[in-house]
Image (cartoon, rainbow, N blue to C red):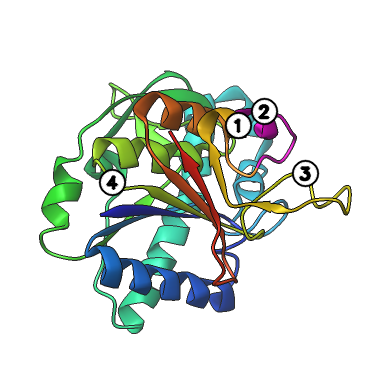
Amino acid sequence: MIVQKFGGVAMKDKQTRKVCIGHIKSGVERHQNVVVVVSAIGRGDDPYSTDSLLHLTDAFSSSKAASDLAASCGELIAAAILSAELESAGVSNKVLHGIQAGIWTTGDFGDGTISDIDPTMITDSLTETGCVIIPGFQGMNEFGQVMTIGRGGSDLTAVALGAALRASHVEFFKDVPGIMSSDPRIGENYKKIENMTIHQLLPLLDTDRPVIQKRAAIYAMKKAIPLYVRGIASKENGTWVTP
């Protein structure tokens, strides 16, 4: 089985989600079982983005637990929408969230750490359906409270689930066709890298908008999980990142 991660850009509207559904269908056909991790819809000031949810009230600054609960709703909304659209497209699926996802966290609200993963409900669900959707960016602490795991945390969710489920690899769908030799936004002399090691990837993630979260890449290095970074709108080969 594999884990597929779709970010806010991939989830931003029905047209882009239709492309996501095509990738999910292909994943199920090829690997039988696919766990899909989603980010909140859109970025910045988009209505259901994490930033928009956090700006609903200034009072969130004095209640980090309430702030995390609100922030987690972006991924829940994205998971619900994708689930309904997958069903409409004929793809059976199940959403697991909160304690169902088995992701346990510790530390501080807004920047929690994954302490343990119990994949029992996920593996049980995969005996009923080939596709399970998990809202990224969040887990439950020992008191049953929702805790988010930092900016870009959905990437970490995907890698951690890949390790816990012993997936063959984790696929990241991006608005670029793979990992580039330099930032396409600030120059023209760049090319896509076909294959690289996780150690070669880490220095490229020290930017304000890394292709994947650095914490996720470090987790993948520790757990020896292969990563595949590919373009959401392209069928060309992406970049394989090997342990």
Do tag 1 and tag 2 residues touch (Cβ < 8 Å)? Answer: yes
Q: Is residue 74 visible?
A: yes
For the residues marked 1 and 3, what is the alpha-carbon distance in whole angstroms? Answer: 13 Å
Q: Amino acid at mark 3?
A: Ser
Label 3, on which residue? 182
175, above or below 21, in the image: above
Q: For the magenta stretch, what is the residue range? A: 202-210
For the residues marked 3 and 4, what is the alpha-carbon distance in whole angstroms? Answer: 29 Å
Q: Residues within 10 Å of mark 2 (few under 14, many from 20)?
A: few
Measured as percent of width and height from the top left, residue 194 is found at 58, 52
Does dot 1 land on a helix, a strand or a loop?
A: helix
Q: Amino acid at mark 1?
A: Gln
Measured as percent of width and height from the top left, residue 216 is found at 49, 33
Do tag 2 and tag 4 residues touch (Cβ < 8 Å)? Answer: no
Does dot 2 land on a helix, a strand or a loop?
A: helix
Label 2, on which residue? 203
Badge 3 or badge 4: first in the primary sequence? 4
Q: Is residue 203 magenta?
A: yes
Which callout, 1 or 2, points to the residue nearer the camera?
A: 1
Numbered circle sitting on residue 240 = none
Q: Residues within 10 Å of mark 3 (few under 14, many from 20)?
A: some
Badge 1 or badge 3: first in the primary sequence? 3
Furthest toward the right, the residue is 187
Label 1, on which residue? 200
